[in-house]
Amino acid sequence: MAVTGDLFTEYCQCANIWSLNQAKNLTKETSMANFSDLLKNRRSIRDYEDKPIGMELVKEIITESCLAPNSSNGQPWRFIIVNNKPMMATLSGDSKNNLLSDLEKNPDSPIKNYEGALRDPGFNVFYNAPCLVFIGGSKKIRSLSVDCALAAAYFMLSAAEKGLGTCWVGLGSNIRDPQLIASLGMTEDYQIVAPIIIGYPKNIPEIPERAAPQVLEVIS
Ligand SMILES: Cc1cc2nc3c(=O)[nH]c(=O)nc-3n(C[C@H](O)[C@H](O)[C@H](O)COP(=O)(O)O)c2cc1C
């Protein structure tokens, strides 16, 4: 936990996200009784119980995520479930190596902000979560990113409603090892949009501050 916390702090500082994880006034028992509560209480979780998650539950959440709106009801999303921690550690390593080699080629890349964490052998981009779901599909579909992002949002809300934690891990989307890609069942045209970890939350952070909405114009 200490390692995860420290690395998460580093992630947040790098990402300039917020001052961090102070009071933890949310609990695992926080009510998700209504949709507004659900929206307010869903958090990105980076610290998980060492407890496996049942495949039936993951599949139920995936089924609910397919209720998301999507362009022309094309439903281009394809899901890959990795319910295996050693495999997730291997995927994390590949993604980290690829990000670091990208950074060498382009030192001004925003990836620079994460260099410290990426160079830390103890940093698993998937935070040692028990399960990972890739949401993606054929890069030939023009609306792929938007459709999959909507499915990802539904996925994260569905999981929260069931008392589970999730985190979209962009740092984990740079899988390029051909053998790994093949073992994941990704076809050549498969593009990862959302790698989402899921599991039982150990710590639920407070909501990172949200700025007030900026409404540029109201025409009435
Ligand atoms: C496209 C995208 C990429 C993200 N990548 C990462 C990531 O690589 N690592 C991480 O810890 N969190 C990642 N996050 C989670 C965000 O940091 C998080 O959603 C944001 O700080 C707001 O916190 P909240 O989800 O608890 O409201 C990502 C979120 C999105 C939408």
Image (tube, rainbow, N blue to C red):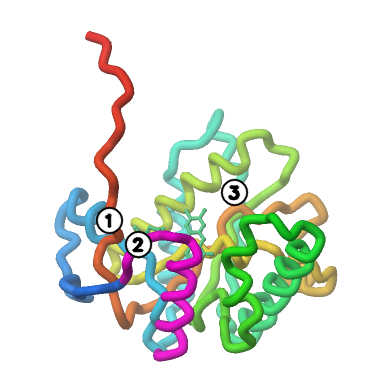
Badge 3 crowding class, 10 Å Cα cut-off, few under 14, some 14 to 19, many 20 or more, is many
Label at residue 77: 3
The residue range painted magenta reads 1-20
- Give whichever of discs 2 and 1 has the lower sequence position: 2
Marks 2,1: beta carbons within 8 A: yes
Q: Is residue 84 above or below residue 213?
A: below
Which residue sits at x=56%, y=56%?
A: 194
- Predominant SS along the magenta part: helix
Marks 3 and 2, how far apart in space? 32 Å
Quadrant for the C terminus, please. top left
Marks 2 and 1, how far apart in space? 7 Å
Which picture quadrant has residue 204? bottom left
Determine if the C-beta at disc 3 is less than 8 A from ligand 1.
no
Q: Is residue 131 left or right of residue 183?
A: left
Residue designated by label 2: 18
Where residue 187 appears, as percent x and y from the top left, is: 79, 57
Indicate the amino acid at tag 3.
Trp
Residue designated by label 1: 209
